[in-house]
Image (cartoon, rainbow, N blue to C red):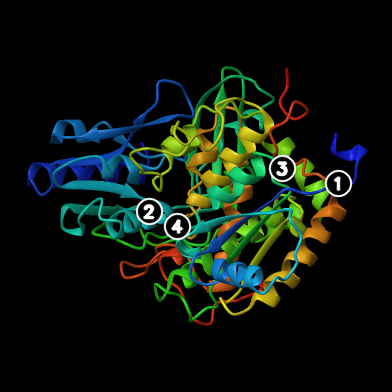
Amino acid sequence: MASLKTFRPNIVAFFCRWCSYGAADLAGSLRLRYPVDIRIIRVPCSGSISPQYLLYALMQGADGVWVSGCHPGDCHYRIGNMHARRRLTLFHNLLDYVGIERARLLFTWIAASEARKLQAEAESFVSAVSALGPARRLVKTLETCAI
Amino acid sequence: MNAYARRIREIARRLLSEKAVDAVVGYRAGTVPMRARPFVARTPAEAGELTWSGFCVGNLAKLAAGLSGRVAVCAQGCISRNLVGIIRENRLARESLTVIAVPCLGMLDARKIGARVNGRPVTGVREEGEDVTVTGADFEEVFRRGDVKRDTCLTCLHRNPVLADETVADPVPETGGGDSDKIIELWERKKPEARFELFTRTFRDCIRCYACRNVCPLCHCTSCFVDRSRPQWLGKTQDEPDVLTYHLLRAFHCAGRCTDCGACESACPVGIPMRRLTSKLESDARRLFGHEAFLSLDAKPALAVYSPDDPDEVFS
């Protein structure tokens, strides 16, 4: 039982392979320390992220979901992150609207050189999600699934 | 027979006998009162079966997209916008489509009428402009259309068709008078816990029949995410997370494309107001991107385009 010990969240991060994943790599090279609760999934582009990935992560029990891509204007595929911005903005607002805690979602733009920004975002996100405790809404558990 | 129906038959008969179209898509009377069935008339004689009433609440755009040859479609404001969408998504060519434009005063909600007459069996409904006369074995009551209209029609923003090759009547006032942003205020005022509680409660009765998906003219993937098993995006049960995830994704797939035709709500056998979700997405698309779905043939869906100046509010 997580609640008996100190709660450590499960955070799923979708990082664009050109920028944010590079930043995570650089953070490693620079020996920057950031919380270990983040599981990074490398994706080709933030524009390739379907909202259904995020919902799937939440449903499978992720306590937080983080999406990060290149700054607008810096997309390797020119406009992938522009499309991602529109799509994820609407999706973020929809999840907020139905009552999923805003703090469980983090969307950032992190360039490959911004290892320190990645470290700072990771620290603040993990502490925000830890403060919320384990995710319950939308999660498939014995508690939410009758019988 | 009302003037709309008479005019629709007239147009359909002419189009079919001149061989200008191969089929006219419209409605015919249902087998029970307060129902109309989608109908494809292929001969001038069959055109005589076409009708029009406040219960033509399906979405013919979807039916038309599945037909081959030249088709004519009876379309209110919302359906005409769906036809624009279907043309834009290359599911139907503009040249093979004839739009029979039906200016719309709002469609009726059989559930609301049923509640107004305290569940007594209704044998007929007569519509004259804003008056709706409901008759039963031993009663006859007159209601204002506004009181028995579907929710979606109360907040309609475009009642006159955006495409018109043939016209059934003179244009009507463009809006239903309601405020479509009011629908989402109901939840937005509340705290997150209360919103989730409302969300759960609203969709609790869902039986996962997928009527909302099947009637929706925006849904046309050959393999829908709910039917996929590898990966299985969500379970097939009626458990809360599965139901809620289904509705979130279904609504999101309509983002920036929904014309608020309300066919999903009308088709739902348990009366779930799923427009609570789609309205939020469309309201955001209006507010953030200044976008309304499919108002003209050269308009692209909100999520198919971008602007360098799009708001960055959810990104850090």
Please tell me which of labels 4 and 3 falls first in the chain.
3
User: Does residue B92 appear left or right of residue B20 in this picture?
Assistant: right
Please tell me which of labels 2 and 3 falls first in the chain.
2
Question: What residue is shown at x 81% (from left), y 48% (from top)?
Answer: A8
Q: Secondary structure at mark 2?
A: helix
Q: Secondary structure at mark 3?
A: helix
Mark 2 → mark 4, Cα distance in angstroms: 8 Å
- Looking at the picture, tell me which residue is in the foreground, A112 or A125: A112
Residue B206 position within the rendered picture, expressed as x and y whole percent measured from the top left: 61, 30
Which amino acid, by three-letter code, is at mark 4?
Answer: Arg
Q: Which residue is mark 2?
A: B82
Tag in front: 2 or 3: 3
Mark 4 → mark 3, Cα distance in angstroms: 22 Å
User: Does residue B48 appear left or right of residue B238 in this picture?
Assistant: left
Mark 4 → mark 1, Cα distance in angstroms: 41 Å
Q: Which residue is mark 4?
A: B257
Question: What residue is shown at x 52% (from left), y 78% (from top)?
Answer: A72
Which amino acid, by three-letter code, is at mark 2?
Answer: Asn
Mark 1 → mark 3, Cα distance in angstroms: 27 Å
Chain letter belonging to callout 1? A
Q: Which residue is mark 3?
A: B199
